[in-house]
Amino acid sequence: MRLLLFFVALPLFGHDVISTKVTWTKELSRLVGRRCASCHDGKASFSLLDYESARPWAKAIKEETGNRRMPPWQAIKGFGDFKDDAGLTQEEIEVISDWVEGGAPEGGPKWLPARSLPVRKAAPVKVRGSWQPGKGGKVVAVKPDGLKPGASAQVVGELPDGGIVPLLWIYRFDSKYLRTYVYRTPVELPAGTRVRVSPADAGTVTLFQ
Amino acid sequence: MQRPCLHKAVKAEGAERLLAKVSAFCLAGNTRGGYTKTVFTSIQDCHAGRYAGFMVPGSISRREVLILLTGAASTFAQEPEPEFVCPMDKDVRSKVPGQCPRCGMKLVAGVPDAREFRVSMRRTSDGLALRVVDPDSGATVRDFELMHERLFHLFVVSQDLAFFAHVHPEFDAATGEFRVALPLSKPGMYRILSDFYPHGATPQLVAGTLMMPGAGFSLGVARPGADLAPKRGENVGVELVLEPPRPLAGFKTMLFFRLSPSEGVEPYLGAMGHMLAASADLIDMMHLHPIYVTEPEGGAYRQIQFNVIFPREGVHRVWVQFQRAGVVNTVAFNVPVEALG
């Protein structure tokens, strides 16, 4: 049976044997539409919009997403709660690697999403100015503009009452994808709050109010 | 004479609907083996205007009908019975409704739409209170599916990887919160993985972070060495065998846990084992269940197999839980994962 599968698969994609039930038409088309299509539309960057375009990139997609280089959101989930969080969930990373390692099959056309979902545009960032530790107040956004290239850093607010608030966790910073992260709910940091970056030599961030 | 009309027909009615009509026609009186005859008689019918689906302006060419019917036939040929999928183990599928053989969850039809729910979390005097929030409405979610015999599974791991908990917060209908007592005393960062299944959505695995302030608080990433030595749980010994022996990031690793003594090993929360695999920096956290359970070598031990694709290189801490004779055993290994090349 294994041999038969091999020969069936041969004319399509070299040596790949299909060993997964995850398919492009079911899971991947939806995942890519949700997470990748806003850039990989064939204009801003190479297309991942359909199976023929995406299939040659399968191994690269697995490697880029598994290593958290793509999508280039850079912030680790669940460390600060941001609007328009474009990071992949752990489950999405698992689905991609299962699909690629299983031979990246297309699947039946009937499962394709009825229409492509509208690409969500990130809300424009409105800030009044940078947040000053002496004055305190609500922080609406954070920008890792002073981080060193390649740095992985956790940023927390150390409150005067001893509490500690997670603000941002950047993994392997790439300034090419520098962005401002907007909190879903502004974070109250009273006067006297100390913003600490760990490790201390990773650089700095700017908080906005 | 008005010529090609297939395009117009498709435009007027929609290709999908046209094809559906043809499919229905094929289905009505013909078996799968009778395609040639179906197509042939359909063409005759169409030319004679007998089939409503082809009552299109002008005449339709034989070639166009053939194209349409061939399309319909292939649609029909690929039209499977409804397919059911496990909302948690995506590779488990079935032609019939039922339960996932791996995790016991109820299979759902079709492809569920993924929505990312949020968990807001606060510390209480003795532990944690968690609230699940609908991503679209912002409302507190109160309706959950049972998953592995519980409404909520919570994994808590400390940044130094010394503390591990797999607990089940209880729902408080008055507040809409899940509450659990947790002995968190050591200052530092704890990563929290919330595992729940909102009714009508998909199972969720939501990562969060809890900061425990206190004297000596500092942030930092653990750098454990490999530890693959056999472990002793409460009432069972666990040996780990890896295949390949040196796991590679991005490629499947099979983890065989050999439990001895083998008798009395039983399901715990609806599965023969539970695993939390976390990268040492606690960025990747995966909750997995066994693929196979066997008793090789004449039952000398019970072998429980998990398949994992570690996404990145580096040491991963792997906690596994097995139940034997009513006692839950929790043991952990440090699995080194290398990058290819």
Image (cartoon, grey):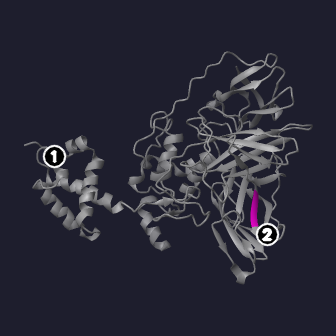
Residue A208 locus on image (x, y percent): 70, 21
Question: Mark 1: which secondary structure?
Answer: loop
Q: Is residue B278 magenta?
A: no
Residue B320 magenta-drawn? yes
Name the residue: 45% across, 34% down: A43
Tag nearer the camera, 2 or 1: 1
Q: Who is closer to the viewer here, A25 or B132? A: B132
Q: Amino acid at mark 2?
A: Val
In this rendering, the answer to whether B317 lies above or below B176 is below
Few, some or many residues within 10 Å of mark 1 (<14, 14–19, 20+): some
Magenta stretch, overall SS: strand
Quarter of the C terminus of chain A within the rendering: top right
* Disc number for residue A115: none
- Residue named by callout 1: B56
Where is residue A19? Give x, y as percent. Answer: 52, 64
Q: Nearer the viewer, residue A12 or B134?
A: B134
Separation of residues labelled 2 and 1 (CA atoms): 71 Å
Amino acid type of the residue tagged 1 in the rendering: Val
In primary-sequence order, the first of circles 2 and 1 is 1
Location of residue B124 in the rendering, given as x and y in whole percent from the top left corner: 80, 40
